[in-house]
Amino acid sequence: MFRVSNLEKYFGEQLLFQHVSFVFSRGEKIGIVGPNGSGKTTLLRTIAGLTESDQGSISLPDRVTIGYLPQNLQLDEEMALGEFVLPIFYKAHQEMLKAASILDESAASCDEMLTRYSQAVENFENSGGYVEEIKFQSVMREMELDTLPAERRMATLSGGQRTRAALARVLLMNADLLLLDEPTNNLDLNSIEWLEGFIKNSSAACMIVSHDRFFLDKTCTRILELDSLASRIVSYSGNFSWYRERKDAERVRAERQFKVQQEKIKQLTNDVREVKEQASRTENSTVNDYLRGRSKKVAAKAKAREARLARIIEKEQVGKPRNIEAMRLNITGRELHRSPILRLENVFYSRGQQLLFNSVSADLIGSRRVVLAGKNGSGKTTLLKLIVNELTPLSGEISLKDNIEVCYLPQHQESLPADVSMLQYFQSIDTKQMSESSLRTFLNRFQFSKNDVFKNISMLSQGEKAKLLLASCMIKNPDLLIMDEPTNHLDIPAIESLEKALSAYTGAMIVVTHDRYFAEKIEPHEVWRIENCSLLVSTEPSSPVANLIDRFFFLFR
């Protein structure tokens, strides 16, 4: 049994959470949800023993092994991939191979060499031997790292490869408790599906912070919500969809109770006022002792009702339901006619010795919405960069219709300048020349306070940078919106705000996403799938949204 008791944590002067208590057992799969800044990562780090709480305690079984996947990796870049993923096994395996090589090259096998080889074999077997090697190869294959040599240095890996290597490392630890912070970031659908199965079949307890609602539905049996308004935690049995259903029902019930009580308070207030006025009129309009006595009884009745009203207000009143203010997104674009606004003709592109596109052709017609699918490394981001002219095809042509305003939302945030404030950045990209006051009001819709806009971009969290990139797109009102994994680093309320804005967007769209609920909500008309250096186009013009996941699911694989 794992026990968390009365945790309290501040970030500077800001209270993240307090009175956080819950227990969980081996094999339980728990999702942790809450808006950005509510303390989800801090809670994981506290349980992992990497951050101290300001109050409370964590009780774990003896000799428990914890596997922690951080959202932001810090690693030794000179370390070999194999050593990073499975250090004890890798070192023992390398030593055994080295000893075997020396033994083979030796003209005569001496006792010292045989002893060294025997010791290396023993160490290899103690580290798990060939059973561990099979597990290592299996996990590396599912994380799409099996084509990389185990000796390759971590410094040479991409950000996505590093994330998958860190996940492989955690999964191979045989941990009793897995703490996973946004584990689906930078994974393609095949890897996500494999991870879902791994977690469901694992005997370890798992705590998962994720914005991927489909993933939480598939893996979790319980949801813990960090309520940032009350700075506390609330537990819900079931997966994410069941949590959301109960949460919505609770909100409706609380709003109804509040409304009923407000009406009751209003009625009692009016009754007290009317009875007081009646007593006052009788008192002032007569000298008859009997009537004056009656008026005193009416006044006493008014006081009793007034005391009842005060009791309701002080002790029984239902608080007005509070909701975290969501991003207020709005993006408009011209509804384009049914003619090609983007044309790819026989596009050829390679990266070094790796061929990515071989004579790729496709048309984007009018205001159609496209989901771009394919495995990690197939070239999805590269194709988007070719379309927005950040890269140039080696042959072929990519043409855009005249007077089409394009906005590109990249997957990574390096495109943002670090040494300027948010306000300065928007003043530099705002073609409408909005006033400072108007820009600050605009950024407030993305949950940036009027003082936040003076922060340097380098000081922002990944979630805040993701919102800033969204804002930079939406201020342009583009005709063609191109987004590469737009839900990465956004919390669930922000994703749902984005879905709502995109559902009303009338322009064209090309989106790379592995968020299956998001893919459904944006209502795509087509799926472009990159496979074997080709681009396969699937369309369902008669009913673009009905049963989308069932019809298009295989195209995301």
Image (cartoon, helix red, strand yellow):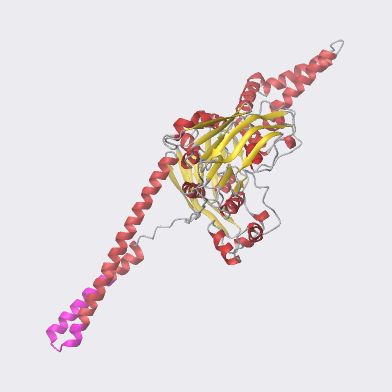
Where 233 falls versus 381 (above or below)?
Answer: below
Instruction: Give me the residue at 58% from left, 62% from top.
Output: 439
The number of discs equals 0
Q: Does residue 514 appear in the picture of this structure?
A: no
Where 123 falls versus 81 (above or below)?
Answer: above
The answer to whether residue 282 is magenta is yes
Among the 4 quarters of the image, the one containing residue 476: bottom right
Instruction: Give me the residue at 46% from left, 37% from top.
Output: 217
The magenta segment: 281-306
Q: In terms of depth relative to the viewer, which is nearer, 174 or 224?
A: 224
Q: In terms of depth relative to the viewer, which is nearer, 175 or 6?
A: 175
Q: Is residue 430 left or right of residue 241?
A: right
- Which residue extends farthest right? 107
Q: Position of residue 227 (x, y in %)?
A: 48, 52
Q: Position of residue 306 (x, y in %)?
A: 28, 72
- In terms of secondary structure, what is the magenta stretch mainly? helix
Q: In terms of depth relative to the viewer, which is nearer, 556 or 137?
A: 556
Where 524 falls versus 285 (above or below)?
Answer: above
Where 402 falls versus 427 (above or below)?
Answer: above
Q: Does residue 23 appear in the picture of this structure?
A: yes
Q: Position of residue 249 (x, y in %)?
A: 36, 48
Q: Is residue 16 left or right of residue 132?
A: left
Q: Is residue 53 left or right of residue 521?
A: right
The answer to whether residue 541 is magenta is no
The quarter of the picture where the C terminus appears is top right
Among the 4 quarters of the image, the one containing residue 246: top left
Q: Position of residue 87 (x, y in %)?
A: 70, 30
Among the 4 quarters of the image, the one containing residue 344: top right
- Which residue extends farthest top? 108
